[in-house]
Image (tube, helix red, strand yellow):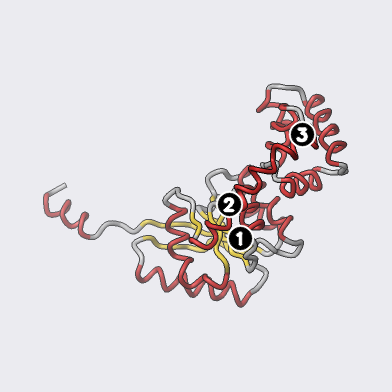
Amino acid sequence: MSYEQVALKNINPSPQIASLLLVDNDRYFSRGVKTILDFYNFQNSRKFIILDEAVREDRLINLVEQQCPDLVLLDLELKQGYCRGLEIIARLKQISPNSKVLVLSTRQKDEVIFQAMQAGAWGYVCKDSLGEQLLPAVNTILEGRIYLAPREATGFFRTFNQHNERSRAKLQQVKLTEREREVLQLLVEGASNRKIAEQLYITIATVKAHLTSIFDKFDVDSRTQAIIKAFRLGLV
């Protein structure tokens, strides 16, 4: 390569391409997000491509498995409430570890922000701040860093401190063993019984025994209820 070619390449570097998946029930809001991203494409060195959209959980999971987007822009609510959204974040983390999640939500409560980040989100943007925060949030996360604006960051750490103070007492009340806490953490991350067994070097039968014990201590009947209870108790 000649000196002139090197110089030209440095002056006009190839743009970085980032693949995005948009997940929101509100078509008008989705259209607004697309408009903002299209506008950024004219100004930003990184170009954004929306691979697809999804409003149903099953379609979302299939798209992430098939296309492995760099970033999922996720409405925390979907159609089943934010607790289900937390489970979806954990599930996406399990099936596509390289796909990061940015939550876009109308919810501004500290507890919701904290739980979303605990579930595995890389950032949280309230929809009323989308115009000013979407680009820095997307770029920050694609660079491998967590994004929280000052308001959300303050709420997150305030809740973190509250949970930290309460967690010891709650752990003693629930009285999970160390192994049960490990199983619970992997459960929240979306791991199957087989995956939990492989991670902890135990049998599937032992995993089932630990899950039964956790369900009894949580007074729940299913994996979903256990995950929700764990978030609400601040155990994960």
Residue indicated by mark 2: 121
Report x, y in % for residue 50.
52, 63
Q: Nearer the viewer, residue 231 or 31?
A: 231
User: Would you say 96 lies left or right of 37 here?
Assistant: right
Q: In whole angstroms, how far apart are the C-alphas of marks 1 and 3? A: 35 Å
Residue 210 vs 95, above or below: the answer is above
Mark 2 or 1, nearer chain start:
1
Residue indicated by mark 1: 74
Q: Nearer the viewer, residue 230 or 10?
A: 230
Q: Which mark is residue 209?
A: none
Q: Amino acid at mark 2?
A: Ala
Report x, y in % for residue 148.
50, 57
Mark 2 or 3, nearer chain start:
2
Residue 98 vs 208, above or below: the answer is below
User: Would you say 145 lies left or right of 99 here?
Assistant: left
Residue located farthest toward the left when viewing the structure as drawn:
3
Mark 1 or 3, nearer chain start:
1
Report x, y in % for residue 226.
79, 43
